Image (cartoon, rainbow, N blue to C red):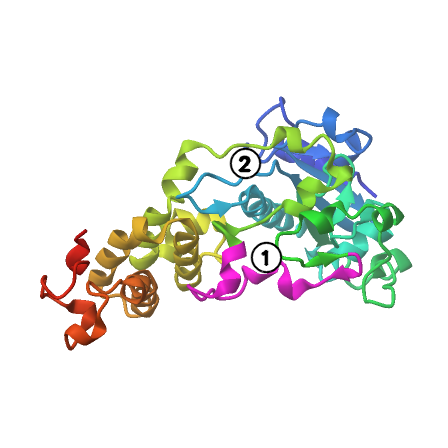
């Protein structure tokens, strides 16, 4: 069988070599870096490919973003990386079909395949760790022979809980469980329903107490990954988002763009991917982040957005305004402590009815 990886690298051009087809698609052999530790690895711009059991594995490593300061929504660099990977897979699949007409995106479970083929280990966080990327990678798989069978292609058999057996070192560690902000990870296992990352797929309800622990996270968390000893060497390289990130994901700017037409075809869709760039869900999460940040600071922006006459956004915007203004009404101190001195002590205008009227000494 021809060396499919070599042919693809020659077709697209290797890093530092000729541009090849497409130019921007930097391909390298996975085997070139698989022996490196995290501290020795620095190429986060390339795609790493390898061909096993009739399947082309395409890895895209990334450097995690720091959670930005208040006023900005957090979107992890995973989503940037996966968008690039998805586009790369489509191009590679098109070329492979010329040689393998049956080639398609693999339908088997990726996690099981990575483990059964010896790429890495399953961690307590349920993420797969691969040298030298750690857990900071995304992967796509193209199956050139979907009808073929081999034990390895079926993936690692699941344990009693439905998951492959985890790395033994995780049993006595507990650092990811201690770092988890929502209590999704405990010594007994992983509660997917409590995971912030998983909950970000669901619609947010601004004002819901459970949204407090989300902070300003729009997409991504990383706390379990950053605390994992197997990722040692990677946290020191955490990337700070550029100025364009802060401009796009400023909470006020993001909320306004969610309420305007064309969000699904905007730059946000290019960054987040079309599956995530759903204006109603993004707006709900943005409003929750505003409440967690400083509700009063963003109130003016939200009130202006109600003038855009956006039917789907209006209920969320009104809910935000209600939540901001309700505490003022509930906590408004009566201007007169003697409730019997007038019919409405909370709005008493008789300055002579009490020494404390209107804040007097």
Residue at x 78%, y 37% (from the top left corner): 131
In this image, 354 relative to 232: left or right?
Answer: left
- Residue in front for this viewpoint, 140 or 184: 184
Question: Which-is-in-front pick, marks 2 and 1?
Answer: 1
Q: Residues within 10 Å of mark 2 (few under 14, many from 20)?
A: few
Residue 59 appearing in the image: no
Residue to which mark 1 is pinned = 196
What count of labels does the image hold? 2
29 in relation to 114, above or below: above
Q: What distance separates the C-alpha of mark 2 from that of mark 1?
A: 37 Å
Residue at x 80%, y 40% (from the top left corner): 2
Residue at x 37%, y 44% (from the top left corner): 250
Q: Which structural element holds mark 2?
A: loop
Residue 62 appearing in the image: yes
- Magenta-colored span: 187-213
| Coordinates of residue 163 in the picture (x, y in percent) | 81, 62
- Residue in front for this viewpoint, 310 or 266: 310
Image quarter of the N terminus: top right
Residue 22, label in figure: 2
Residue sitting at the far front: 355
| Residue 201 part of the magenta segment | yes
| Residue 85 part of the magenta segment | no
- Residue in front for this viewpoint, 308 or 214: 214
| Coordinates of residue 91 in the picture (x, y in percent) | 59, 46
Residue sitting at the far top: 16
Badge 2 or badge 1: first in the primary sequence? 2
């Amino acid at each position: 069988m021809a060396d499919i990886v070599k042919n693809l690298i020659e077709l697209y051009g290797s890093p530092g070599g000729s541009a090849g087809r497409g130019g921007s698609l930097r391909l390298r052999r996975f085997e070139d870096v698989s022996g490196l530790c995290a501290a020795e690895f620095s190429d986060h711009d390339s795609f790493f490919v390898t061909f096993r059991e009739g399947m082309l594995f395409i890895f895209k490593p990334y450097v995690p973003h720091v959670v930005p300061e208040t006023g900005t929504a957090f979107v992890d660099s995973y989503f940037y990386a996966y968008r690039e990977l998805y586009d790369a897979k489509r191009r590679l699949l098109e070329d492979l079909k010329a040689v393998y007409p049956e080639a398609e995106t693999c339908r088997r479970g990726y996690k099981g395949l990575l483990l059964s083929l010896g790429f890495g280990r399953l961690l307590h966080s349920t993420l797969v760790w691969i040298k030298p990327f750690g857990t900071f990678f995304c992967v796509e798989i193209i199956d050139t022979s979907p009808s073929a069978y081999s034990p390895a292609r079926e993936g690692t058999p699941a344990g009693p809980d439905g998951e492959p057996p985890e790395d033994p070192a995780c049993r006595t560690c507990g650092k990811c469980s201690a770092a988890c902000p929502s209590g999704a990870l405990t010594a007994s296992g992983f509660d997917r329903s409590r995971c912030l990352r998983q909950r970000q797929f669901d619609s947010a309800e601004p004002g819901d107490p459970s949204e407090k622990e989300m902070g300003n996270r729009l997409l991504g968390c990383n706390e379990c990954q950053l605390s994992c000893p197997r990722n040692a060497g990677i946290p020191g390289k955490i990337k700070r988002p550029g100025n364009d990130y802060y401009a796009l994901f400023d909470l006020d700017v993001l909320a306004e763009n969610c309420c305007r037409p064309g969000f699904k075809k905007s730059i946000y869709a290019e960054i987040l991917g079309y599956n995530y760039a759903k204006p109603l869900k993004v707006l709900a999460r943005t409003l929750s982040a505003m409440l967690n940040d400083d509700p009063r600071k963003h109130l003016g922006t939200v009130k202006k957005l109600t003038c855009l006459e956006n039917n789907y956004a209006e209920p969320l915007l009104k809910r935000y305004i209600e939540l901001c203004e309700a505490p003022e009404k509930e906590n408004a101190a009566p201007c007169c402590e003697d409730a019997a001195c007038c019919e409405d002590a909370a709005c008493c205008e008789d300055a002579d009815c009490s020494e404390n009227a209107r804040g007097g000494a």
